[in-house]
Structures are given as C-alpha cells and as structure tokens.
Amino acid sequence: MGRWEPNARGRFEQAALDLYGEHGFDRTTVAEIARRAGLTERTFFRHFADKREVLFAGSALLEDMLASAVAEAPAEAAPLAATAEALEAVAAVFEGRHDHARRRQAVIDANAELRERELIKLAALAGALAGSLRRRGVPDPAAALSAEAGIAVFKVAFERWLADDRHDLPHHIHESLNALKSVAAGR
C-alpha cells in the first residue's frame, strides 16, 4: 500500500460508499475501507475523523460556499434573493455527481445515526447562511428566517433531484423557490 498515493481522499470515499452499499454502514469497518481503497487505516485517519465523516466531509466547503455567495450577492438583493443565489452556487458542486449523491443518500436514509448527522449538517448550513446575511446587515428574524427557508428549499430540491433523471439540481431549486413564494403569497 503506497503512502503517497494520488487521490487518497477520493479513493476512500468511493471505497466507503461501495462497502456501505454492499454491507451496510454499521457492518463496514475502517480497516475494510482502507483495504478496498488500497491504502492504510493510518492514512484514512489523516483524512477523516471516523467512518461517518466520509459521507459528510464536504460540509465545511458547502458552508463556505454559501457564506461567500451571500456576501457576493448584489447589495440591493433581498435576503431571500441572496439566499437563492447562494443555493445556486452550491448546486454547482453536485453537477455530474447524481449517482454518487443517490448512493450516499441511500446509505444515510438507512441509518438513524447518519440521518441525525445530516440534520446537524443542514443546521450548520443554515447557521452559515444566517451569519452571512447578518454580516450584510439583515436583522433577525429576517436573517434566520431566510436562511432556514433557504435550507428547506435546498432539502426539498435535493430530494426531488435525486428522484429525477431529467432535470438538474438548479432546476429543482428554482421550482422549490417558486413554490415557497407561492405559499408565502397565499396561492
């Protein structure tokens, strides 16, 4: 097993996802993931704190992307419009990863501990969005409401995208945002 193998992180992610699909999350060990990836357990722990983090490793990147996109939104953008721009920016991360996202979500859906971790991740994303909106001068409760609504839109859009082979994630984000606006307008 090579110590400095290229794309170790990606190899671990692929090996873990394969094994979680084959044997289930609970029955898969870090040793098995490392063996399947052709790397060592020590190398695994250089990249991930535990086997759950293989599924959630991109959370910090998403938080940063959301916060940056809100900060870069036009100054005149309303809080929900700035949030929508941030969601569209994050959607780019998932381009070309439809199958991976489906497989990852199936593993999460099959395990209560992972579903809880997913909720924690979504709460952190909402916190990052709200913080960025506040830095733009959006007061509470508007910042918190816009952020929470944005994450709800993203969650619904993501679920719809996973079930749809025809439309991309940005399409579902736009549809979900329009549905939210209709609900808010009483239509």
Image (cartoon, rainbow, N blue to C red):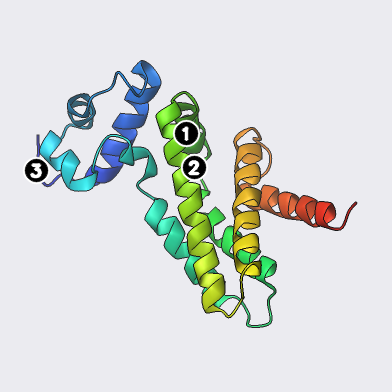
Q: Nearer the viewer, residue 147 or 3?
A: 147
Cβ–Cβ under 8 Å for marks 2 and 1: yes
Q: Which residue sits at x=45%, y=27%?
A: 112
- Which quadrant holds the N terminus? top left
At label 3, the amino acid type is Arg
Q: Is 57 located above or below residue 109 in the figure?
A: below
Q: Residues within 10 Å of mark 2 (few under 14, many from 20)?
A: few
Residue 34 visible to an observer of this rendering: yes
The percent position of residue 181, horizontal first and vertical second, equals: 79, 57
- Mark 2, mark 3: which one is toward the viewer? 2
Q: Amino acid at mark 2?
A: Leu
Is 11 placed left or right of 160 in the picture?
Answer: left
Disc with the residue nearer the chain's start (2 vs 3):
3
Q: Which residue is mark 2?
A: 119
State the SS at label 2.
helix
| Residue 166 badge | none
Mark 1 lies on residue? 115
SS label for mark 3: loop
Residue 43 falls in image quadrant:
top left
- Residue linked to disc 3: 3
